[in-house]
Image: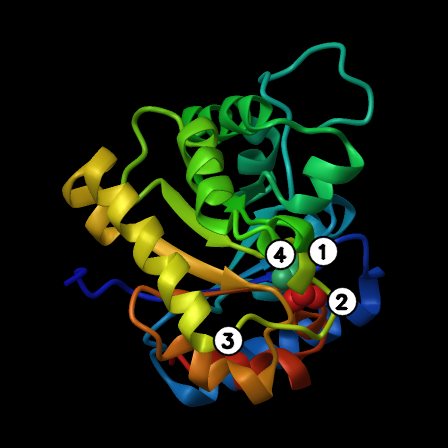
């Protein structure tokens, strides 16, 4: 049986949010967390990069961490439009999402690229949230475990620990669609990922947080978060407002 780990509820805002509304939502979330007392989970918001500075001020004194949504593998250089893990650390981030399926699909990122980015996140002293997940077609062909297994092998660098790495299982067909796998399906994939992590990273694999992502909302979060080897959630659409995100946080608090 896997070790009990502190859950992480992470919001991925993608390319959404403008300053004043974003600050308002984060302050509202911080206020609800403050009233609740000491939360039993970690809470993370990954906004677009232009919001990092204003939100750093908004989360001050709260237990909300900030994260980046992607980074370049290099620390600096001639890479127009990119941001490095060191820059995200400098902006106050604690985490960086890498290998999100939207990056893999829209920017042609391979697992090899994802691995290099995860190494960069570790180099900068941050935690990498490494995303894996099968497409709908792959699921129909019953290739879920084969696809996820290969992504894990190829995307996770040496040196992953329970502290510096989080794995997010996000079936591509469930992201932003309102569809979710059954609880049994999620449990099966998470048990598979746990076994793989333990085999490769030993005790670190046992303690590594495994998040589920894909259309998590208040109505399904309780069931999903109660599953064995599900140590939190990566939430897209339902993380954009405190009203939607707070009940999801509360499932793990
Ligand atoms: C995501 O973008 O990682 C995600 C899970 O999105 P959503 O919750 O909107 O499906």
Look at mark 4 in the image and give the residue it sits on: 140
In the image, residue 131 sits, relative to residue 7, either above or below, namely above
Taking the spot 35% from the left edge, 50% from the top edge, the residue there is 193
Instruction: State yes or no: Cβ of the residue under disc 2 lies below 8 Å from any atom of ligand 1.
Output: no
Q: CA distance from mark 4 to mark 1?
A: 43 Å
Judged by depth in the image, the label closer to the viewer, 2 or 4, is 4
Question: Where is ligand 1, by quadrant?
Answer: bottom right
Residue 12 appears in the picture as rendered: no
Q: Nearer the viewer, mark 3 or mark 1?
A: 3
Q: Which of labels 2 and 1 is toward the front?
A: 2
| Residue at the image point whose x is 61% and y is 65% from the top | 214
Residue located farthest toward the front when viewing the structure as drawn: 141
**Tag shown at residue 22:** 2
Distance CA(mark 2)–CA(mark 3): 32 Å
- Residue wearing tag 3: 182
Which element is circle 4 on? helix
Q: Is residue 187 left or right of residue 1?
A: right
Q: Position of residue 160 (x, y in %)?
A: 32, 33
Q: Give the percent coordinates (x, y) of residue 122.
A: 41, 30
39 or 141: nearer the eye? 141
Marks 4 and 1: CB-CB under 8 Å?
no
Q: Are marks 3 and 1 in contact (CB under 8 Å)?
A: no
CA separation in Å, label 2 and label 1: 9 Å
- Could you give the CA–CA distance between mark 3 and mark 1, rounded to whole angstroms? 38 Å
Residue position for label 1 = 54
Left or right: 90 in relation to 172: left
Residue 197: x and y, percent?
28, 43
The reply to whether callout 2 and callout 3 are in contact (CB within 8 Å) is no
């Amino acid at each position: 049986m896997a070790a009990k780990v502190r859950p992480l509820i992470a919001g991925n805002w993608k390319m959404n949010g403008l300053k004043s509304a974003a600050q308002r939502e984060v302050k509202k979330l911080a206020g609800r967390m403050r009233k609740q007392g000491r939360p039993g989970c970690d809470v993370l918001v990954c906004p677009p990069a232009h919001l990092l500075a204003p939100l750093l001020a908004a989360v001050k004194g709260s237990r909300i961490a900030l994260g980046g949504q992607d980074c370049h593998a290099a620390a600096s250089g001639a890479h127009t439009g990119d941001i490095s893990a060191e820059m995200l650390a400098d902006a106050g981030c604690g985490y960086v999402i890498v290998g999100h399926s939207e990056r893999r699909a829209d920017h042609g990122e391979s697992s090899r690229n994802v691995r290099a980015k995860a190494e960069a996140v570790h180099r900068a002293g941050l935690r990498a949230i490494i995303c894996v997940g099968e497409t709908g077609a792959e699921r129909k062909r019953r290739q879920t475990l084969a696809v996820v297994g290969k992504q894990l092998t190829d995307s996770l660098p040496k040196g992953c620990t329970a502290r510096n790495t989080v794995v997010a299982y996000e079936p591509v067909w469930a992201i932003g669609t309102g569809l979710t796998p059954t609880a049994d399906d999620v449990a099966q994939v998470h048990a598979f990922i746990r076994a793989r992590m333990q085999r490769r990273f030993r005790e670190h694999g046992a303690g590594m947080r495994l998040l589920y992502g894909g259309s998590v909302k208040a109505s399904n979060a309780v069931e999903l978060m109660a599953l064995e080897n599900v140590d939190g959630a990566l939430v897209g659409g339902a993380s954009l407002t405190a009203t939607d995100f707070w009940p999801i946080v509360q499932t793990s608090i």
